Structure formats: structure tokens, C-alpha cells
Image (spheres, rainbow, N blue to C red):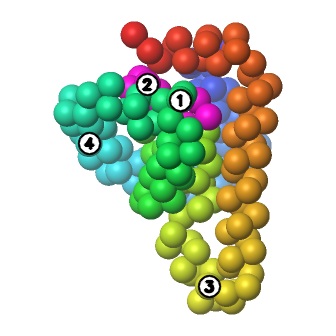
Amino acid sequence: MKPYSGILFSTALCGFYLAAFPGRARGFFALAGSNFLVVLSILPPVFILLGLFDAWVPRERVTAMLGEKSGIVGAGLSIFLGAFAAGPLYLAFPIAETLLRKGTGLFNVFLFVGAWSTLKIPMLMFEMQSLGLRFAFVRYAMSFLGIFWIAWAVDRILGERGRRELAGRFRP
């Protein structure tokens, strides 16, 4: 699949929607423009910080702390980084790519993205306040276990060859 095929498919889908419902075009474009401006305001600072991280943090240090052989320390650090990160999920992917380029193991990248999507500390605080301590802690514990299980399963399904191939795309 070509990198631009998703954009072409999305554009075609929007075209079909607008052809089927022409009266909704104004609201559609207003919402799309608003979302585009939000993304445009968030991404440049993240890319600047990623560039600084890439330039200032040596690859050997990242590999030692988050690499394939980092064990439970690397897993814990990956979860910590994901849970304490701020921002929408689409920011996790350029950060994950930078981590892969720096030598982070795939299992730890899977943990990082999983923690970013489900273990955010502000979300836990909101759940504790709104839904109660019991619900919040049970949901958090189940999500924590689920992230490990999913990361382990994806890592195993990829196999050695798949891990090598995927990591090879991001490593020099």
C-alpha cells in the first residue's frame, strides 16, 4: 500500500459524502478546517522537541534504557513515559518512530503507545472524581494488564523475522 493511498481514499470518501449531502458542505469544511488548525498548532512544537531529543540524547543511552535487553526497567520506563505524556494520541506515533530510530525495542514501543492511549494520569484523576475510586483503579489495572498482554501478543505474532524487518525500517 502506497503512503498516499490513505489520503486519496479519505479525499474520495469526503467527495462522495459531499455529493450525497451537499447541504452539509459548509459545516463539513468548517469542522475540517478547525481540526486542521488544531493539528497544525500542536505538531510543530512536538517536532522541534523530537529534533532536540534526537540531537542531544545519544542512541547508546536510549538503547541501554529502552532497548531489546532493557527488561523490566525498560518496560516500566516505557509505561511511565506514555502515562505521563500530554496530548492527543496522534502525537505518540512520531515519538514512537523517534524512539525506534534511537534503538528502543518494539515491545517497549508497543507499551509506550498503549500507555499513551489508555493510562493517562489526568484521565485516571478524572475517573476517580467522576466514577469513583473502585472503578478507576479496576479500569486502570485491567488496562495495564491488557497493554502488556497486547504488546506481548503482537511481539510474538511478528516473530523474529517480522521484528527484524520492522525495526530495520527505522534503524540506520
Q: Nearer the viewer, mark 2 or mark 1?
A: 1
| Residue 49 tag number | 4
Question: What residue appears at the point 61 percent right and 39 percent down from the top-left corner?
Answer: 110
Query: Disc 2 to disc 3, how far (Cα)?
Result: 36 Å
State the residue in front, 64 or 161.
64
The image quarter in which residue 10 lies: top right
| Residue 69 tag number | 1
Whether residue 122 sits left or right of residue 65 in the image: it is right
Q: Which secondary structure, mark 3? A: helix
Please rate how many residues cluster around mark 2, counting C-alpha atoms within 10 Å: few if below 14, some from 14 to 19, many from 20. Answer: many
Tell me which label, 4 or 1, sits earlier in the chain: 4
Q: Which of marks 4 and 1 is in front?
A: 1
Tell me which label, 2 or 1, sits earlier in the chain: 1
- Label 3 sits on residue: 128
Query: Disc 3 to disc 1, how far (Cα)?
Result: 36 Å
Query: Disc 2 to disc 4, how far (Cα)?
Result: 18 Å
Whether residue 61 sits left or right of residue 117 in the image: it is left
| The residue stretch that appears in magenta | 99-109
Q: Position of residue 59 (x, y in %)?
A: 32, 25
Q: Which of marks 3 and 1 is in front?
A: 1
